[in-house]
Amino acid sequence: MNAPAIWIIAPIILSFAMLIVRRHYRIVNLAQVSICILLLFLLLFVRFGTAGPDGGLAITIDPALNFLGRSFRLQDTDRIIVAFFYLILAIISLVLLVSKVHSKIVPLGMTLVGMLLAAIAVEPFLYSAFIIEMAVIIGMIVAVDLRLRKTKGIMRFLIFFSLGMPFILLAGWYLAGGETNPVSESQLIQATLLLGLGFLFWLAIFPFHSWIPLIAEESEMQEGIFLLTIFPFAIFIILLKYLNGFAWLREYALVYQAFTVLGVIMTVFGSVWAAFQENMKKMIGYLTIAFTGISLIALGLNSKQGFLIFSDLLLPRASSYLLLSSAFLSIGKDRQIESISDLKSVFHFHPIAAIAILVALFSLAGMPLTAGFLPMQELYQATAGENIRITVIILMCNAMLTFTFLRMLSTMTHYVDEEELEENPVERNLGFDILLVIMMAFVIMNGLNPNLLYPKLSQLLSSFEFLIR
Amino acid sequence: MILNTLLILSAVLLSVMLLLARDWRYVVLGLSLVYLAGFILIVQIWPIALAAVKLVSGLMGVTLLAMIKSNLEEPQSTEDSLSSRIFMFLFACLGWMIISATIGRVNEWLPIPYTNLYVGLLILFTGIIKISLFPSNFEILIGLLVFLAGFDIIYSSLEGSALVTAIYALIVLLICVLGTYLEGQSVRREE
């Protein structure tokens, strides 16, 4: 047995097997939650290729799977990346199970996660572009809602990723030559341009961003958020692999300058559009763009601190998105949420879900006492040391978002009289409320005590030993 | 030499056919011929077994799309005007001119056979035009397949790998399955 067979191939096969019996949805959903938890549990005891600590219960397995002359390799340091993917899938599947909502994430989520992990694990890693393309097609099937007959967003998703693929592959071919032969300055610029163009499409950098708000708008909230959580994460990991893998690329100052400039553009663009957005789903799409920009700014710092901030930013992003998705699922059973005005007085009918939405949004904006505070604080500090103008821009963007969220708070707590409350009783799902409270507590606990999870998350960077100098 | 010239000419004709044909049957036929042209070019570099995988997977995908389309009653196209076709043709001409003018420089950068690069770029550009100018999902997916077929001709000339061939075949089939999934909904609605 080897690691890719357990964490990549087996989930994909199981996912297809579960597709056959999908009419027993609840059982399949339960099975998906159990498999994800089992895979996470196994990660605690299994080491990939290296011996565990003395006296521990660790089992060592082969890290590589050879397939058609190439290999899929999961290093021991990749365990945190694998855990991150399966944790997100486990939580979202559990939320679906408790809320009794049907979604194509069950069971296609496992195929999607398996494919994204395959894209990260494939060697030589320039082939990851092909596997990402396959994952995009599966992602489209998950996201598309044929009842609405809206496919513009998913088609753009496919087109932009397909347009990015040739650039990444050609850059990979170019860079592979650079591994053995010294490259000239002009070759360096050409390869960097190719790679840059590829990642412009993949990271939805302005003006190739339009699929993000469209996907968020056209799909159901949980499916849209699932895609917007795991795809950017996978693309960032692949970007880091490229930087880590090629010495001259990671030492090319222009790359980091480009990250900073593009990051600032995305942060400003995403924040301004999110602040003036009335459609709730589209707003989440623009928040994704803004947050991707913030992650790029962190990478653009080109320092150990910058990379640590990048890894720390993953926690508030994932936890806030999962919390938002769960809260909207809870409210969505009672009322259709399209625009912000649909949230009017929601606090009086769904107090827990309303608080969850606010906690998630304020965590994204980096408010104190939430999980987003620490990485944002670190980012302000680090960028202030490099270029104070960037700090001011990020602060202004976050201030703008905070005002928007405060406006939402006012809408959500709008007064309703007792009669209206009695006329519209809300059916409570105690299990779901408990789940929401636990998720909120998680976000707040990580804000109150950053030592709880952040040090573990920074282990993610141990896969990129050349970047962390 | 004659074969290479014929292949370039046939790529130009295929490009016209894919852009100007309105009946899905001609579009699907054009796509099949693109895969055939790709096969003829790739088989000159690769073993026939690997090159055949691309052809077979492409034709399988085309069959899938044709099957679902044949079950669907053709709606009246709104873009049948002569002016739109002339625009499309002129746009394609502009693309051919750009490709012809820059092919020498590109060939210095990408050291692959001239015919493969020329045909690959022509088909790739046709795919991009199709993706950007046609509104329906079916046409966009066909455009995407054409784009990928064009890129595959270029990339296969640079790098040969069984894994890449397998994944490429899977991508083509998945796009066709996606096409049947999206188009199939229309069939179910009609029923």
Image (tube, coloured by chain):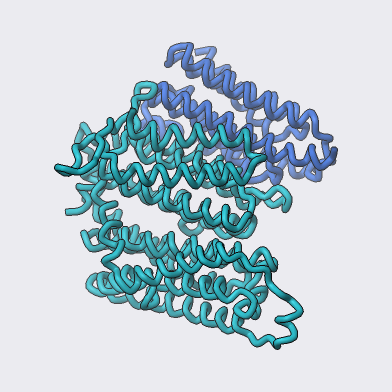
What's the colour of chain B in the image?
blue
Position of residue B142 relative to residue A252, above or below, is above
User: What residue is at 48 percent from the left and 11 percent from the top?
Assistant: B48
Specify whether residue A164 is in view: yes
Q: Residue at x 36, y 60 (%)?
A: A296
Q: Is residue A250 left or right of residue A35?
A: left
Q: Residue at x 31, y 61 (%)?
A: A453
A384 horizontally vs A337: left or right: left
How many marks on residues? Answer: 0
User: Quadrant where the C terminus of chain B lies?
Assistant: top right
Give x and y (percent) for residue B111. Answer: 36, 27
Residue B128 or residue A153, whichever sits in front: A153
Residue located farthest toward the left when viewing the structure as drawn? A54
Quarter of the image for residue B130 reads: top right
Q: Quick one: B148 or A33, which is closer to the camera?
A: A33
Image coordinates for residue A52, horizontal then vertical, percent: 20, 41
Chain A colour is cyan
Query: Can residue A189 be seen here?
Result: no
- To which quarter of the image does residue A415 belong? bottom right
Q: Write the residue at 58% across / 49% down.
A: A156
Task: Judge from the rendering whether residue A52 lies leftward or rightward of residue A214; answer left or right.
Answer: left
Q: Position of residue B43 (x, y in %)?
A: 48, 14
In x, y percent, where is residue B20? 72, 34
Does residue A459 lie above or below A408 as drawn?
above
Q: Quadrant of residue A457?
A: bottom left
